[in-house]
Image (spheres, rainbow, N blue to C red):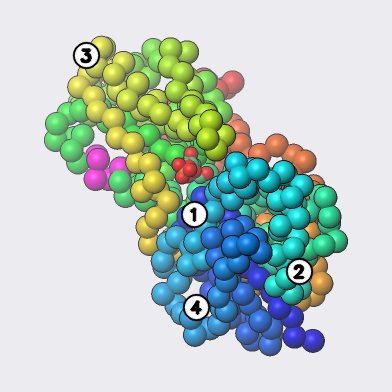
Amino acid sequence: MKKRLGIITVGGDCSGLNSAIRAAAIRAETLGHELLGIQRGFFGLFPESFGYIQLTSENCGEELLTSSGSILFSDTKSFTTCLNHGHSQKEILQLVYDGYRKLSLDGLIYIGGDGSLTILEEVLSHNPDLMNVVAIPKTIDNDVNMTDFSIGFSTAVEVVVDAISNIRSTARSHQRTIVVEVMGRDAGFIAVHAGVAAGADVILVPEFEYDMSRVVDKVKRNYDSGKKYCIIVVAEAVESASLKHRIVNSHDDVTKYRGIGQHIADHLKTEGFESRAVTLGHVQRGGTTAILDRILGSAFGAEAINALVAGEHGVMLCYRGGKIEKASISELMRGINKRLDESDMCVKIAVNLGVYIGELSGS
Ligand code: F6P
């Protein structure tokens, strides 16, 4: 029987979302099912602000493989907006269930990151049988549990690596130290992967404490050895005893990070090194979609349709050891978010190549 399925992107955007949407549209059409693209995240699902388009192979062409952002738009504030307008948490969940029912959906593909998956878990835990959901992990931070990679991470890493190669030429010409601050929230995956791939001299991540005097030593060694410039990559959530830079925005309760890169550059100036800081910011959320994100998006989009058609739901698709697997959403949310540890391949590369990456137990 023909099914009516939906697909929605929730939370911060990234590159690779459109590859997943395209693959889902093609797979649904091939199997004879209908796919609605819900627009603006949960706003498009709430009956009072419905918004959706019919997705087909015609309006989901190959150009979606490379384009960043989401053709369905995204949403990071529907729940807080509703709370601010006086709706209770229970009423908001009811709006979601009502929207799903009024659209006569038989299943929903939910593309979300760590924060939006937590919201999904909340939605499903109250009424697990009201909605058939298959989730797809996306986030440039790569901090979703149980999947090696999430959509968007590889493109973000490539954007950072490209930026560092531009920064390197000016650092070398001016014999400066340049500190590059990257995103990632509380996880250092972007920093360590991009730092290793771009040949950074120092990589600082939230998972490992760092000692400023060892950063200074490393910079000094670069100048003494004749290299005479230095590239430092620092993840936005890295803490310093003398800098309180986490700001929780009271409006939407979201933590923002400000200024660790500048803080480190300022310190290095006091040590006599000409230093600059560059914060890459939201540049990391765009960019021509990296090949792994195109492949991952395509695999996840098509497999999500297969799963819903086969009657599976309450699961998130994961990429593990080169295969697409499934994890139960409730089980997934029980564990802590994924974080770097000393066994990570890129951490080991950094150590083996003499990059200072913080105070590791073996260092
Ligand atoms: O979670 C993805 C992410 O890009 C983080 O790396 C970053 O801290 C945050 O979102 C930025 O959020 P916003 O777009 O709301 O400023």
Is the CB of mark 1 within 8 Å of ligand 1? Answer: no
| Label located before the other in sequence (2 or 1) | 1
Q: What stretch is highlighted in magenta?
A: 164-168
| Disc 1 target residue | 13
Callout 4: helix, strand or loop?
loop
Label placed on residue 60: 4
Callout 2: helix, strand or loop?
helix
Asked whether the residues under the numbered discs 2 and 1 touch, taking CB atoms below 8 Å apart as contact, a structural biologist would say no
Rounded to the nearest angstrom, the CA distance separating label 4 from label 1 is 18 Å
Drawn side of residue 215 relative to residue 251, left or right: left
| Label located before the other in sequence (2 or 3) | 2
Residue ranking furthest to the front: 86
Mark in front: 1 vs 3: 1
Callout 3: helix, strand or loop?
loop
* Main SS, magenta residues: helix
Considering depth in this image, is 123 or 63 the residue closer to the camera?
A: 123
| Disc 2 target residue | 101
Q: Is residue 107 visible?
A: no
Label placed on residue 272: 3
